[in-house]
Amino acid sequence: MKINEDLQKFPVQLVFKTRNFLYNSNVNVHLERRFIMTIPVFLELVEMKAKTASVLPFLIGLCFSYYHYKSVHPILVLLFFIAMFLFNMFVDMWDNYNDYLNAKNSAYQKETNIIGRENLDLNLLKVLMGAFFALATFLGLVLTYLVGWQLLVMGLFCFAVGILYSYGPKPLSSLPLGEFFSGFTMGFVITLICVFLNAYQVFAWDFKSIGAIFLISLPNTLWIANLMLTNNLCDKEEDESNHRYTIVHYIGVKGALWLFSLTNLLAMFAIVLGVSLDLAPATVIFTLLLIPFIYKQTRMLWEKQVKKETFICAVRILALGSFTLVFTYAIGLLL
């Protein structure tokens, strides 16, 4: 048996431990689980490196609020940012938790998923998730009381997507809709909420207003969707072994690569259209200087779809593209 070897893999640098039973090779195996996790493990658990996907759409909403409505409410924005960040951490923990529990592939459960790999205590995770969820909910209700029921509707939509993304008989992440819901929610709805909070006294719920916000948030929406697409592209075999049939399963590797490329092209077109319609200052057009960089990253992904080597291509496009978009928008506001 490999029990002793497996136990030796887990770092012994913690004060408190609790014991759970794990099911392994038809034998109930008594394993020690971490009750206190290190900061690096926590940051990986909540996927801190991926927070660009929510923070930069928030900043675009802030820039658009000032540019288009000349209105910013710092206290409301700060409360929303805290609630958004807490809920985002809850969702990432929730995703890892459900992926661990529902894994059909034992190698994925023990070696890839951070909960199994780091032997984290499930009760500790439940406490952390409950705390983050409760605080985010409380702040959301406070903001709803201050600005109106429309925020409650948008918040409930975000909560539903966040929970159902990895939970239920058919989680969104295991369906061809995962990319759409992640991109739409984090790229568009976060920006919409930020704009509404800053301009709720004068905000009009009409096609023109919603369309303007949709267009200005479209690059982020598409890049976030591409991030999920690339993740599913690199994990195609692993996903299928865990009975997760994402869009890559249906359109194939080549189809996914073409979709990735066309999505980046559409993001560039949205930037040009946003500037031409005066939804963003002229300085935002300088984001197009990233086209050679985006082309290079896209070529790298076309050549190889390996998680450890080319998933970073989509991360780079999202991070640098979104940052440049916010930076050039902010520069335009200052000029």
Image: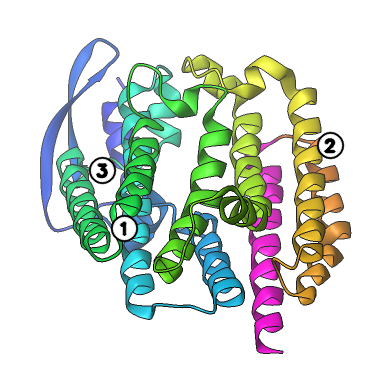
**Mark 2 residue type:** Glu
**Mark 3 residue type:** Leu
**Mark 1 residue type:** Leu
**Residue occupying image coordinates x 43% and y 58%:** 193
Question: Magenta span has 13?
Answer: no
Tag 2: Cα neighbours inside 10 Å, few (<14), some, or many (≥20)? few
* Rendering coords of residue 59 (x, y %): 53, 69
* Rendering coords of residue 153 (x, y %): 34, 45
* Rendering coords of residue 257 (x, y %): 78, 32
> As drawn, is 33 to the left or to the right of 282?
left
Q: CA distance from mark 1 to mark 2?
A: 37 Å
Asked where in the image residue 262 lies, by quadrant, the reply is top right
Dominant secondary-structure state across the stretch colored magenta: helix
Q: Which residue is mark 3?
A: 120
What is the span of residues highlighted in magenta in the rendered image?
306-335
Q: Nearer the viewer, mark 3 or mark 1?
A: 1
The quadrant of the rendering that contains the C terminus is: bottom right
In the figure, 274 relative to 102: above or below?
below
On residue 100, the disc is none
Q: Which residue is mark 1?
A: 86
Question: Magenta span has 309?
Answer: yes
* Rendering coords of residue 199 (x, y %): 45, 69
Q: Which residue is mark 2?
A: 303
Asked where in the image residue 2 lies, by quadrant, the reply is top left
**Residue occupying image coordinates x 48% and y 23%:** 174
Mark with earlier residue (3, 1): 1
Q: Nearer the viewer, mark 1 or mark 2?
A: 1
Q: Nearer the viewer, residue 130 or 136?
A: 136
